[in-house]
Image (cartoon, helix red, strand yellow):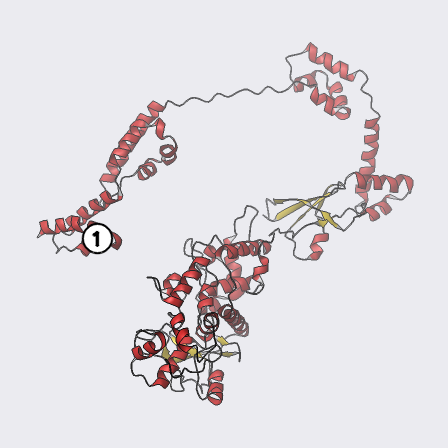
Amino acid sequence: MLAFFPRIYENELLYSVISRYHYFSGNLNIKDTTRDLFGKGKLNIIPDLPTDLNALIERVQHFSDKRLIDWLDQHTLYNYYTNFTNLKVKKHVLERMTESTGKHSLHHITGQVAGNVKEHVYFRYCPVCLKNDIEVYGETYWRTYHQLPSVFVCIEHSTFLRNSNMSYRQRKSSFAQPSLMNCTSINDSNPVTFPKMSFELLLKISMESYKITVTDYKFNQGMLFEIYRYLLGLKGYKNLNETINQDKLREDFILFYGKDYLRLMQSIPCGVEGKCWLKSITRKHRKSFHPVRHLLLINFFGESVDTVRYCLNKNDNPFGEGPYLCLNPAAYHYQKPVITELKISRCLTTKKPIATFYCTCGFIYSRKGPDIDQKDKQKIGRIKQFGDLWMKKLHYLVYEERLSYRACAKLLKVDTNTVIKYIKNQGRQNKKNDYLPSNNREQWLLLRNKYPSLSKTELRKVNPALYMVLYRNDKEWLNDNSPVIQRRKVHDERVDWSMRDYELLNEAKKAVQELMKSKKPVRITKSLIGKRIKRTTLLEKKITKLPLTMHYINSLSESVEEYQKKRIKWAVKQLEKEELTVSKICRKAGIKKCYYQDLKEYINKYINEHQ
């Protein structure tokens, strides 16, 4: 049972607490300290993601009332490295930290090793915090968020952090205990300076980093993907076909932060397909990304880790969420949100979205987007249809109220020429309604009987006057009683599959001969042959119709094991003048280590023959 355990300070790394215990206990060997605290002699304590926490809590529970969740949130970087990962990774890391189970290291699991955002080489500290600690406590300690790769500013004092002379990754069997001797820059009067805008950004990202260190936001990769897609659409980076304008996004992202700032954050987007983190993070998440890159993207969108979750399950419509305003001055619901039907298309020249709004009153209008503010919602780009309600209002104002065209145009919020145009159209419509078919229909039917083989266009040429009268006044009847176009049926030529099978067989044989001549061994497969003869789809979908070709390909196809043995044979021949070993042959043949054991007997056969 422990005789004492140091006081745990606010935001202190658990590693720092253990370092102070080691110092005050008088233990000369790190194994003695870890045996006291964990019940076993460990050679190394990880600063950011320590393991065996359950064993530690059990031994120090008499000196501290902190629970496991308190240790994780306040004294480790568990939340920082798992907040933007999936539930499986979070669970795996938690099990590894509490019970020290699993084969892989935590830095592999969280993606730190695979990423190119490197952690700081030395432990870091705030000179003001250091001075206050010495005055108040008589000692100092390492703070959690000061060690994050995205933090360069102390959020409590708004001062730049300094490097100590203690390595963040200490060699085994040693501790990095903070002290005035280790933190040599306490009296440095010339700290590193940044432009004002960069400092504000540094402070903001530092505060966001602190939040994700002490709080579990319960994000997951699917949630983040949906949120980012919504914000990309909201900011105008997503096209109507759901693709992202990556070039514009990258240019605006670099312009927003500046290359110096992004270089400091180790996050300059390169723009190269497959290597650009900004492209990958805005697509479906197939891997983990470093927290600093999530924070930079969220800040670029004008959000924070506290507000970004409210963007989930929102419609990324460039015209906002409905219902939309009806802008028909003749309707009682003028400028009220009653429109629910909306269709979005894309401008062919500017590629911007165009929305067409359909109201139940018959009024249809459109405008080019996206809508930036509330004033945009009251704009009309083009009126496509006024509707019956608007036409009745126009008729009432002109013929009953006896208002001038100019006054009517002012009330209906259109041009005077528009009022004149539709008044004339109403007059023409009235004349059309007065039209009586009389014997025009009979004449057209007689014309059809007289020339049964002629088409509609040819009948029009026989009697153009009759056709125009019916077209203008009785168009629907004319269409119903006119000859229907007889479309010719096009017969597809049938494929001679036996001939095609023979042709493909010859092509496949030529491709195989070329592959056999290559310097290095090549695995013969249906896919590779298909690519060589440019007939992959045919070989995949028409297998039953190509028996000769498929029999030839199947007879040559190699399994993975056969192909590995062929490579080993080739490697032995290449290394004929050298001393042969299993590892040397496998490296030359390009065999992965996981297959060494299965192929060891086969390789030893060649080694014995060589000897």
Q: State whether residue 213 is above or below residue 360.
A: below
Residue drawn where x is 82% and y is 41% of the image:
419
Q: State whether residue 195 is above or below residue 101.
A: below
Of residues 154 and 260, the one drawn nearer to the viewer in this rendering? 154
State the image coordinates of residue 322 (x, y, percent, origin top left): 68, 50
Is residue 168 visible in the rendered image? The answer is: yes
State the image coordinates of residue 12 (x, y, percent, origin top left): 45, 77
Is residue 110 visible in the rendered image? The answer is: no
Report the residue marked by disc 1.
597
Residue drawn where x is 64% and y is 17% of the image:
455
Give the position of the N terminus as an image quadrant. bottom left
- Indicate left or right for 478 with 425 as reference: left
Q: State whether residue 283 is above or below residue 521.
A: below
- Indicate left or right for 440 with 519 as reference: right
Query: Could you tell me the amino acid type at mark 1?
Result: Gln
Q: State the SS at label 1.
A: helix
Q: Residue furthest top?
A: 450
State the image coordinates of residue 82 (x, y, percent, origin top left): 45, 63
Q: How crowded is the residue under tag 1: few (<14 C-alpha within 10 Å), some, or many (20+)?
A: few
Residue drawn where x is 70% and y is 49% of the image:
323
Q: How many marks?
A: 1
- Indicate left or right for 115 with 578 as reference: right
